[in-house]
Image (tube, helix red, strand yellow):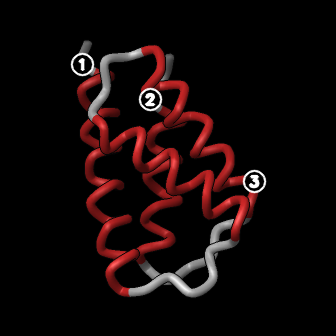
Amino acid sequence: MTTQGLLEAADVLDELVSGGKPERARLLSGALALEAFYRYVDADQNVLAAGVCLRSLAVDGADGLTAHDRSHASKLASAVRQAALTRAYQ
């Protein structure tokens, strides 16, 4: 498994943090990458949480995110990038 999907998911989370509204396909692609990574690699719970978050936003839409939601997305993006870095050095 490459780290590209993880990094793209982190980018989508960053877009949410900055107030952007990523396309549904990008949200779903990120969710699938994170959920697959979590399933097949011993990953942090935050990676799964990020995948669930992106899947939910793909289904329900990304309108109306609060400052708290964006702060949480920022923390999840950091966790996903850390997982990508860890994976790259294994």
Q: Quadrant of residue 29?
A: top right
- Above or below, 70 relative to 58: below
To which residue does mark 3 refer?
A: 25
Near mark 1 (Cα within 10 A), the count class, few <14, some 14-19 or many ≥20, is few
Q: Residue at x 68, y 49 (%)?
A: 28
- Badge 3 vs badge 1, beta-carbon distance below 8 Å: no
Near mark 2 (Cα within 10 A), the count class, few <14, some 14-19 or many ≥20, is some
Pointer 3 or 1: first along the chain? 3
Give the amino acid type for the residue marked by disc 1 in the picture. Tyr
* Mark 3 → mark 2, Cα distance in angstroms: 19 Å
Q: Quadrant of residue 32?
A: top right
Q: Which mark is residue 16?
A: none
Give the amino acid type for the residue marked by disc 2 in the picture. Thr
* Number of the front mark, 3 or 1: 3
Q: Residue 50: x, y in percent?
A: 43, 50
To which residue does mark 2 refer?
A: 3
Q: Nearer the viewer, residue 13 or 52?
A: 52
Q: Residue at x 56, y 79 (%)?
A: 20
Near mark 3 (Cα within 10 A), the count class, few <14, some 14-19 or many ≥20, is few
Which part of the image, by quadrant, shows the C terminus?
top left
To which residue does mark 1 refer?
A: 89
- Badge 3 vs badge 2, beta-carbon distance below 8 Å: no
- Badge 1 vs badge 2, beta-carbon distance below 8 Å: no
Give the amino acid type for the residue marked by disc 3 in the picture. Ala
- Above or below, 86 relative to 20: above
Q: Residue 72: x, y in percent?
A: 32, 67
Residue 42 in the figure: left or right of residue 64: left
Could you tell me which secondary element the residue under label 2 belongs to?
Answer: loop
Q: Residue 30: x, y in percent?
A: 58, 45
- Above or below, 88 relative to 44: above
